[in-house]
Image: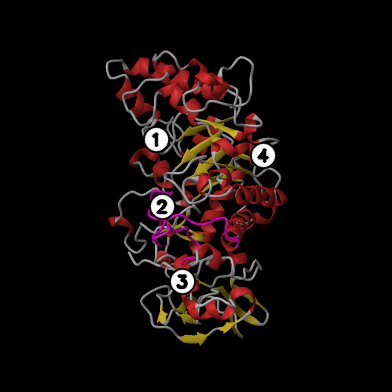
Amino acid sequence: MKIHFIPICMSTLIASLPMVSATDALAQNPDAIYSTYETYNGSDLEMTLNASGTHFRLWSPSAQAVRLKIYPTGRNSASEQTIEMTRDKNGTWTAGIPQKLYGKFYTFQILHNGKWLDETPGVWAKAVGINGNRGAIIDFAATNPEGWDNDKGPSIKNINDAVIYEMHHRDFSMHPSSGIASKGKFLALTEHGTTNPKGDKTGIDHLKELGVTHVHILPSYDYNSVDEANLPANTYNWGYDPQNYNAPEGSYSTNPANPSTRVSEMKEMVKALHDAGIGVVMDVVYNHTAENDGSNFSLTAPGYYYRHRPDGSYSDASGCGNETASERQQMRNFIVNSVKYWAKEYHIDGFRFDLMAIHDTTTMNEVARELKKINPDIFVYGEGWTAGDSPLPVAQRALKDNVSAMPQIAVFSDDIRDAIKGHYTDETDRGFATGKPGLEETVKIGIVGATAHPQVDYSKGNNSKAPYALSPTQVINYVSCHDDLTLTDKLAKSLPEESVADRQRAAKLAQTIVFTSQGTPFIFAGE
């Protein structure tokens, strides 16, 4: 790992901080230095087109110089043009070309501390070439399916009117018996009339038959672990390794090499679900990136977007090697503007935040507030915990225990999850639904949606010792999700001597509690 203790241009810093010697500057806390960066929240970051041509704007306040490169293809080609960008306002660099460069690709490259870093599509690429290494210039209006202007998800008064179904694109359609042609693709959710060999409905017809109101799709942005140029050779991945946050994942499209295809097919999926009366919740992972020094964040503004330990190494509350710094204004702007983009361009109806407590409550409140302006029916929920410690003060974290400071945000209830089926860390541990005594009060905490209630003794709760929700609308009730054992597997491990029929009875009891409790019911695909 390459360590950045002070990952900025020191000459630029010292010139901008009078009365500070080089030695003093080196001894400063990086947070104090990053706070001197001007930030930019305009709508023209990255690349825009208009009648006068194609325009580029990159936020890179510590860069000594920036190059823009234009390519004819998404990979394996030399650049056609290399343009020196001009330093502009608020830490940005700009360049313009007096033609609409539809069909072309681009990268940026910054000079940092005297060294040219690797090329990057930037952090705001909305379309990318194969494997996401180059930004793509496409006509987004041409990617809209017929009727897109009038497309809208289901209207719900409150989040707890929803029934959420979590699914992974490949899991949902890949099985040979699915009857679906576009296996593992966005388009799988556009196919009607599909059945398995027994005649049971599959695909979108199965979802309608279930009666769910929203599908929660696991990460669908462009992620790092799948080689889009060699899809048959790939192993399974959930997609929690972000690369390009604002472009769809190419492996879920029928042609990853065509930047427009992944955009148009994801929109077709959304519209097909909306036409079926089903909303789309997108799983977002702004808390960490797949790469450290090699991420698009690091290659445009080294160090800024991440939290670091005192020794300069990456802090790691995500358990994935790094954690982002939502409290810094440009990162906050990025998160807020990114979800707004997905809501506007792709008509997404809700967002699930992975390891949400790595983010600060101010950022999450702004996320909810800005999304509600776009669509009052949009809702936001997330994991109210981290995977490790963080430099962000506990009082500022978007934790389950701090959800009262985020009135329009909901959190998953680990109370009801572990009490019903047994603790997630012990596969053989039983819960209320599988006959373990002493969990009644913790189950009741889940039933009342973690609100204050005279018939609930919080002192006997396993995970929570006090009510934390202002309203049941702030709680997502579930018994299993993509993490850890599915409910079926948990029951098999904790009830090994019982018959399948008895395990099915336990599963029915578990789901009955979830669906009859206050709060929002959430089920995992296949339950």
Q: First in sequence, mark 4 or 2: give its number.
A: 2
Which residue occupies 39% across, 60% down?
311
Q: Which residue is mark 2?
A: 316
> What secondary structure prevails in the magenta region?
loop
Nearer mark to the viewer, of 4 and 1: 4
> Do the residues under discs 3 and 4 have CB atoms within 8 angstroms?
no
> Do the residues under discs 4 and 2 have CB atoms within 8 angstroms?
no
Q: What range of the chain is rendered magenta?
A: 302-329
How far is the residue under mark 4 from the one under mark 1?
A: 43 Å
Which residue occupies 66% across, 32% down?
470
Tag on residue 407?
4
How far is the residue under mark 4 from the one under mark 2?
A: 28 Å
Q: Position of residue 224 (x, y in %)?
A: 39, 59
Nearer mark to the viewer, of 3 and 4: 3
User: On the picture, is 470 further left or further right than 314?
Assistant: right
Which kind of residue does numbered mark 3 sit on? Answer: Leu
